[in-house]
Image: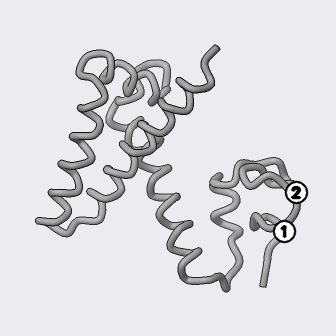
Amino acid sequence: MTDQHYFRGDHPVDICKDCGKGQYSALHYDMLPKVINPFESAIDMFCLKLKDKLLQSARAKGYHGDEDDGRKMYDSIIALAGEGHAMGEIIYKLTRYRRLKDPVDIEKAAAWCFLIWDADKRKRNAP
C-alpha cells in the first residue's frame, strides 16, 4: 500500500511533488502508508523525534531566542565555546544514555549532530 504523499518516485526527496510540502512536515507523517518496512518506519519516527527536538522543544525552552532561529543559538555557543562544546554535548548525552537508557539522550545527541552538520554545510556554501 502506498500513498501519493509518501516520498517515492521521480521527484526531489525533500519536497512532495503532489502538494509541495516538505518531506518531514506533519502532513506527511499523518499520511504515511499503513504498511511500510519496519526499518523505514523506525527512520521516520527517529526523524520526527529529531525535528521535534530541533524545533518545538528548543522553542519551548527559549533556545531560539526572539527570532525563532535555532541556528543563532548554536552559532552563539560556537562563537563563545568553540565546536568542541557541541561535540562534548554529544559525548555527554551518549554517555548518559549508556547509564540511564533514556532514548531522549540519543535524540539530543542527534540534534547536536544535526547542528554541527548544518553549520558545516552553511560554511561550505558561504560566498
Q: Is residue 65 above or below residue 26?
A: above
Q: Is residue 64 above or below residue 10?
A: above
Cβ–Cβ under 8 Å for marks 1 and 2: yes
Q: Residues within 10 Å of mark 2 (few under 14, many from 20)?
A: few
Q: Residues within 10 Å of mark 1 (few under 14, many from 20)?
A: some
The mark found on residue 4 in the picture is 1
> Of residues 89 and 19, which is closer to you in this image?
89
Apparent side of residue 121 relative to residue 112 in the rendered image (left or right) = right
Q: Position of residue 6 (x, y in %)?
A: 75, 67
Q: Position of residue 47 (x, y in %)?
A: 51, 58
Helix, strand, or loop for circle 1? loop
Q: Which residue is mark 2?
A: 18
> Of residues 91 and 59, which is closer to you in this image?
91
Q: Quadrant of the C terminus?
A: top right
Question: What's under tag 1, amino acid-wise?
Answer: Gln
Apparent side of residue 18 relative to residue 50 in the rendered image (left or right) = right
Question: What's under tag 2, amino acid-wise?
Answer: Asp
Q: Is residue 95 above or below residue 6?
A: above
The mark found on residue 65 in the picture is none
Quadrant assignment, res 38: bottom right
> Of residues 111 and 59, which is closer to you in this image?
111
Q: Position of residue 34 (x, y in %)?
A: 67, 82
Helix, strand, or loop for circle 2? loop
> Which comes sooner in the sequence, label 1 or label 2?
1
Query: Which residue: 30% across, 23% down?
Result: 77
Query: Which residue: 36% across, 56% down?
Result: 107
Q: Quadrant of the N terminus?
A: bottom right
Query: Which residue: 18% across, 48% down?
Result: 92
Alpha carbon separation for disc pair 1 and 2: 7 Å
Query: Which residue: 46% across, 50% down?
Result: 52
